[in-house]
Image (tube, rainbow, N blue to C red):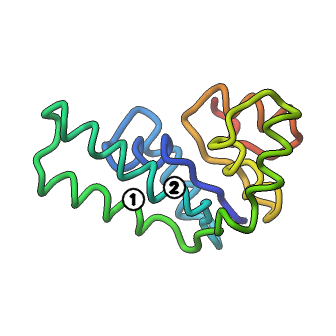
Amino acid sequence: MTVMLDVSAAVEVLLSGKKAKLYESYLADAELVIAPDLYVHELSNVVWKYFSAGALSRDDAVFVAEGGLQLVDDFVSGAEIWKEALSEGMKQGHPIYDMMYLVTARRNGGKVLTNDKRLAELAKKMGIDVVADQ
């Protein structure tokens, strides 16, 4: 099974959130974990927000970010998928950032692992497999 990991699910795992065990089980069973290269930027930004809020020290922030990068086996280049993501975003009326994840999943037959309910619902609407416990 291929899993497309979104940053919201990665952060849930990294910070031991409520759904961490569920997501960890999918990651452990996956043959391949993928994400668009946008994931690197989004993860870095989320970790920076935790640091800025005083929830993570500088060292912990770097540790969490590195852990998040290690969860992904392969990053899909945004340069390869931007046009399809833009087209889907216009069609669905949804931000392109999220469409990068869904296009990555669809192109690779991946199951979407996300903690973002709106993204999960859109994936279902588009016929893309999503972790059931949303």
Three-letter residue code for mark 2: Tyr
Q: Position of residue 50 (x, y in %)?
A: 24, 37
Q: What residue is rendered at 66% in x and 26% in y?
A: 118
Three-letter residue code for mark 1: Gly
The residue pinned by badge 2 equals 39
In front: mark 2 or mark 1? 2
Q: Is residue 94 above or below residue 72?
A: above
The residue pinned by badge 1 equals 68
Q: In the rendered view, does 93 fall on the left or right side of 12? A: right
Crowding at dot 2, Cα within 10 Å, few <14 / some 14-19 / many 20+, comes out as many
Q: What residue is rendered at 56% in x and 48% in y?
A: 6
Q: Helix or strand or loop: what does disc 1 sit on?
A: helix
Q: Position of residue 107 (x, y in %)?
A: 82, 62
Q: What residue is rendered at 41% in x and 41% in y?
A: 12
Upstream in the sequence, badge 2 or badge 1?
2
Q: Position of residue 125 (x, y in %)?
A: 86, 31
Residue 127 - label = none
Query: Quadrant of the image for the N terminus?
Result: bottom right
Q: In the rendered view, does 102 fall on the left or right side of 115? A: right
How many tags in the picture? 2
Q: Position of residue 74 (x, y in %)?
A: 58, 73
80 or 68, nearer to the observer? 80
User: Is there CB contact under 8 Å for labels 2 and 1?
Assistant: no
Q: Quadrant of residue 37?
A: bottom right
